[in-house]
Amino acid sequence: MKLSWMSIGLVASLSRGIEAQQTRRDVPRDQLQYDVNYFDQKINHFPDSEIYTKSNLSHGTFSQRYYFDDTYYKPGGPVYLYISGETSGPSRFSNLQTGIIQILMEATNGLGVILENRYYGQSYPFSTSTTDELLFLTTNQTIADNAYFAQNAVFPGIDCDLTAPGTPWILYGGSLAGAQTALSIKVYGDVLYAGIASSAPINVAVGYPEWYNTIQKYAPQDCITRINGIVDNFDLLIAKNLTSAVKEFKALFGLGVLTDDRDFAAAIADPIGNPGFYHSSTWQELNWNSTYGSRDFFYFCGNVSDIDAPEEITQVDYLFANYTNGVPWVGLGSYANYVKSYVLELCPSGDYNSNDCWGTQNASAWASIENTSTRSYLYTSCIEQGAYIEGPKEGPALLSRVVDTSYEQQWCTWAFPAGVSNSIPPTPDIDAYNNFGSFNFSADRLAFIDGDQDVWNDLCYHSNFAPPRTASTDLHPEYLITGAGHHWDSYGILDVEAEPQFIREAHRWQIKTVNRWLRKFDGWKKSQKS
């Protein structure tokens, strides 16, 4: 499916003369900055769709930011489009500097470009984000942006036409951007030549308790066993309606002000990862590259499982033993002490019950229509993506079972009241993702790469719930990185050969995969004209 060719009138950019390019190339790659360019993007790619006919906002364009690196480019090379996802374009610079795009550019004489997603960074169609103004934040609109940009983009300082499909455009995205990459290739495969989807959620559900399964399996088991036991016992207090004990338990963590049990449960799960907006560096923030990762999760676990904790801390384990037939809540003192010592300080205001920290029950606090990435991401979750993190229905739990999908769905109701032309559904329309193939998702020249220790992996191609993956081919390649987390392949250190083996081999595989595709581009290009 091709987008209609509209007037190119596209671009206002900062100048990039030869002298400026040379100055940039003299800077170490991991410190490179990139000039901002602006693309004249359509607000609405589907004016005839009944979804948008009620809106008076669907005409016109907005300025969409993009950045590019032509350090390695030689005429005839491909264009690598990095899908920015749920953040600003500049926060993705590392992928051009030393990451996956740099690796592929160097290997194939390509040009790399970051396109900032609509409704993120400074690429907002409107000055605010009311429910009506958010109507155009959908997966279909976003992937249409990618195709229209590829058909029309210009790169100041590059004298040749690099538009698709005349030039091979190869997309890369991780996480939500990985799903957008996969969908872009499937829907616009006659414009966009190929793509690599890393940690891409292709089968979503409204609730996603499986987020914790990876941590249950791979984290230090003494720590996990202690937390499971403490969560079980807290849930026991809730189930028996022992309100005074619950209140005392909250106070032990310094969080007595959190009157909502779900807010409290989310707060003490902050070092692990929780629904919504955690403040700690969690399991998801682990990384093979220390420049971008954090080991805080292991520091947390080491504290919870400390067998040499001072007596004043270990004695806390017995405070609630009368509710469990005299059996101590092993690790409770260490857990509570860690939260008080290291987690609470992540709320600078000290108002733990505010929406800036762990309180979520102030409906008016959700009503701000300011343009923010948080609001945009929440909207996407509410209308299409789902994947609300919740406590498990059965089995061990690292997050209290009091947290279910209604907890996050309430935020949607408060944040996005019905407008004139748009309203959110009562539950996310997850078919917007799943109808493209779910775990059987496939498109030519689309590679799926995942990490088996990624908390999001059970939504991805290599999910434990997916059919067995055994036959990678040139047209439909796939790779599961043993020991890797959330799109770990997107990070690099400028020397692939010096990387840890499991990352090095993944990057070698990606280079070979792309080179195989490029060798067949001329044949594909001719077929598009016939």
Image: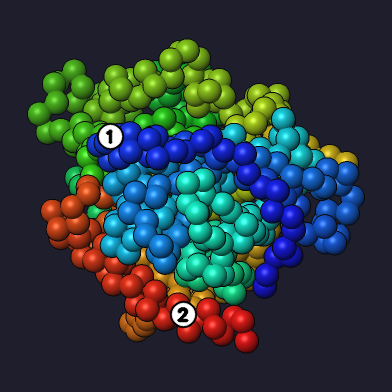
- Give whichever of 242, 376 is nearer the camera: 376
For residue 41, which numbered disc appears in the image? none
Residue 26 image point, x, y percent? 27, 36
Residue 422, can we see it?
no
Residue type marked 2: Asp
Structural distance between the alpha carbons of marks 1 and 2:
36 Å
- Give whichever of 233, 283 is nearer the camera: 283
Q: Which residue is mark 1?
A: 27
Residue at 62% x, 28% y is 361
Residue type marked 1: Val
Q: Residues within 10 Å of mark 2 (few under 14, many from 20)?
A: some
Which image quarter: residue 289?
top left
Q: Residues within 10 Å of mark 1 (few under 14, many from 20)?
A: few
Quadrant for the C terminus in the image: bottom right
Residue at 74% x, 45% y is 61
Q: Which residue is mark 2?
A: 522
Residue 474 image point, x, y percent? 37, 81
Q: Is residue 520 left or right of residue 327?
A: right
Is 243 situated above or below 374? above
Residue 29 image point, x, y percent? 28, 40
Residue 288 image point, x, y percent? 23, 48
Is 386 situated above or below 529? above
Is 467 situated above or below 96? below
- Give whichever of 414, 337 is nearer the camera: 414
